[in-house]
Amino acid sequence: MPPNHPPAPKPFKPYFFYGHRKPSQNRPVVYGGLFSSRKTIPARQSPRPTSPPAPFHLHRWDSDHRGPLPSPPPAPEPPSSIAASRRLSPIARFIVDAFRRNRGDWGPPVVAELCKLRRVTPSLVAEVLKAESNPTIASKFFAWAGRQKGYRHDYAAYNALAYCLNRNHKFRAADQVPELMDSQGKPPSEKQFEILIRMHADANRGLRLYYVYEKMKKFGVKPRVFLYNKIIDGLVRTDHLDLALSVYDDFRSDGLVEDSVTYMILIKGLCKAGKIDEMMELLAKMRANLCKPDVFAYTAMVKILVSEGYLEGCLGVWEEMKRDGVEADVMAYGTLVTGLCKGKRTDKAFELFKEMKAKGLLIDRATYGTLVESFVAGGKVESACGLLKDLIDSGYRPDLRIYNSLIEGLCSVKHVDKAHKLFFVTLQEDLQPDFGTVNPILVSYAEMRRMEDFSKLLMQMEKFGFSVINDLSSFFSSFVCVEERIPIALDVFRDLKVKGYCSVSIYNILMRALKKSGDVKLVMSLFDEMKNTQIEPDSLTYSIAIECLVALEEIKEACTCYNKIMEMSCLPSIDAYCSLAKGLSKIGEIDATMMLIRDCLASVMSGPMEFKYSLTILHATKSGQAEKVVEVLEEMVQEGFPPSDVAYSAVISGFCKHGTIEEARKVFSSMQERKLLRESDAIVYDDMLVEHMQKKTADLVLSGLKFFGLERKLKAKGCNLLPP
């Protein structure tokens, strides 16, 4: 009886539940996994011994299977690039994966991966370049592929390289592709230059576009009419009309015939440049050689001329359109009416409006609104109201912009009651009126001193949800722009203050307006009044007060306001810094002035140039030579900053610390010789110099006595050397 041998093990055949099968032409790859596998997953798997890597076989490589990558793992790519790589062929995807695994660095690992391939074809190179986003890797891969034995790039590969470089903002390198083609025995054709021209035209790079065109002529390639149009259009759109006209001269010298696109591109460029006579000549040439422009071409011309403000040329084009028998449409009429209204040619615009009505064209609400605004700006409020009635009769609903224009016009002719009624109409129409709606009414009530109506309107605004305090701040800000209205604004403010309409911003607006008008004492009275109320001043209030106190020569009070701002952890305004620095320098507080200058420049992004020059003067005094300081002062004069008290305080501070009195006096005498310093001011500065030097000397003596411990002995003997 034969011995019992165990049955031979069956060869393992992967099943789709346990793993993916070997793909074939009619059977896709099917993956296994946790939810598709029927096998029980063990709780703990023992570590498997590491085995040497198997040799690479391209026919067994699966581009869809992403195994563990070598450490460190590359950064995750965006979904768009992953989706693009999935559309590639397997070999192209293998190349892109090789770039990705090496973090986009070209080196021996990448070359080793590429050498696993038997050969790279030009179509494969083009496919990889279309998907690659690193221009350096793309260029080196292109060069590597070109070094294959018996290999030559085709036009598709060169085009893909140009697209790749331009896509990654390397358009200057892309412009060198034609030279690369020529050096490799592949002279560039018109198609390669067309690609570069399209790239530059789409990116509005007019000069680079002309550079490519010049290179095109150097290679002896003549563009077609279509490409000439593209070049001329790109140059016109980038405001290089002279270059566009030179290209047009080449166009004619090549014996090509213009089409309608060529004419219209040049006509638009001439319209934009305001060359009306040349444009009319070209228009007549187009009419004689080809055809007359249609309504769309004329509308484009009118639109360009209106946008550039050439109204006379626009009307000339309109007459040419009538002469050609071209019937204008709503767009052409609306464009011209809008341009004439902006150019304050309301009468001519209204004539065209009547033509539209007579022809039965459908006029839109924007045209009505433009005419209403133009009539109001010209003081023809009755005509504007007539247009409003016509608008409503035509079935339109006026918008808030039209109502605001009419309210402003009625208030300008002292019909404020009618304007107030229109305000209620906007509320009934649920148009949500804003501050621009009520501001003309408030201004009219204030000028007419109708404070009861003013207060009633404020109550109505509160009822309908307006932010009255903020709107009042905006009202006062616009109202005091006219200096004659400032007394009226103060009267209105006093009346409103009794009724509780008051805020810090309103105080600041009035104080700033009074300071500009020169009424400094009234500003300080408002400041004192504000401190006696429950309203707390802010940094802007204190900044205005500092300027006024310096003007009143109350420097100590100004310093108190500055300290208040510092306690609030805020910063004064630039004008407050400058005023306080000048005030301190006038009373001889040199050290305080220098400290204020340093604080300003350390806290403010762009401090005053005078402060910056003061620090430059301090640095120049370290040399101990008056000539270098004079050079800085002369530079200040040349830059439009004549030296003032602050600059001379820096001279005194610097020479008292780093130089001598004689050098400082040389600076003052030199400025006197240049007639940049009066003799009386020089005497004042000399006294300040001596006084500041004495103070610095006393400070040094006192510091020495304190250092050696002699201060108590001198006090015991009653010596007057030390200050009290």
Image: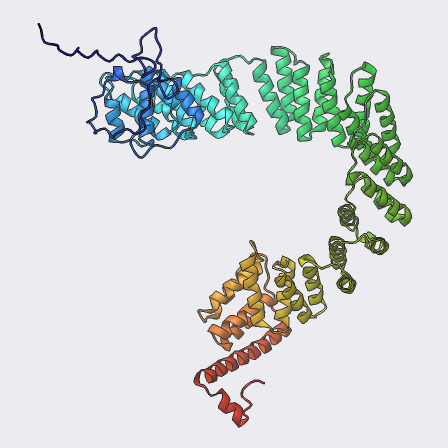
In depth, the one of 284 and 294 nearer the eye is 294
In depth, the one of 623 and 672 nearer the eye is 623
476 vs 421, left or right, is: left
Name above or below for residue 429 compared with residue 92.
below
Q: Quadrant of residue 296?
A: top right
Residue that sits furthest to the left in the current view: 1
Where residue 46 appears, as percent x and y from the top left, is 25, 29
**Which quarter shows the N terminus?**
top left
Q: Say which residue appears at 58% left-offset and 68% top-offset.
A: 593
Where residue 163 appears, as percent x and y from the top left, is 41, 23
Q: Say which residue appears at 55% left-offset and 67% top-offset.
A: 595
Q: Quadrant of residue 76?
A: top left
Q: Is residue 699 visible?
A: yes
Name above or below for residue 552 compared with residue 212.
below
Where residue 358 appears, as percent x and y from the top left, is 83, 16
475 vs 670, left or right, is: right
Q: Is residue 379 visible?
A: no
174 vs 118, left or right, is: right
Q: Say which residue appears at 61% left-offset and 21% top-offset.
A: 267
**Which quarter shows the C terminus?**
bottom right
How many marks can you see? 0
Residue that sits furthest to the bottom in the current view: 717
4 vs 366, left or right, is: left
In depth, the one of 196 and 363 nearer the eye is 363
Name above or below for residue 69 compared with residue 525.
above
Q: Quadrant of residue 212?
A: top left
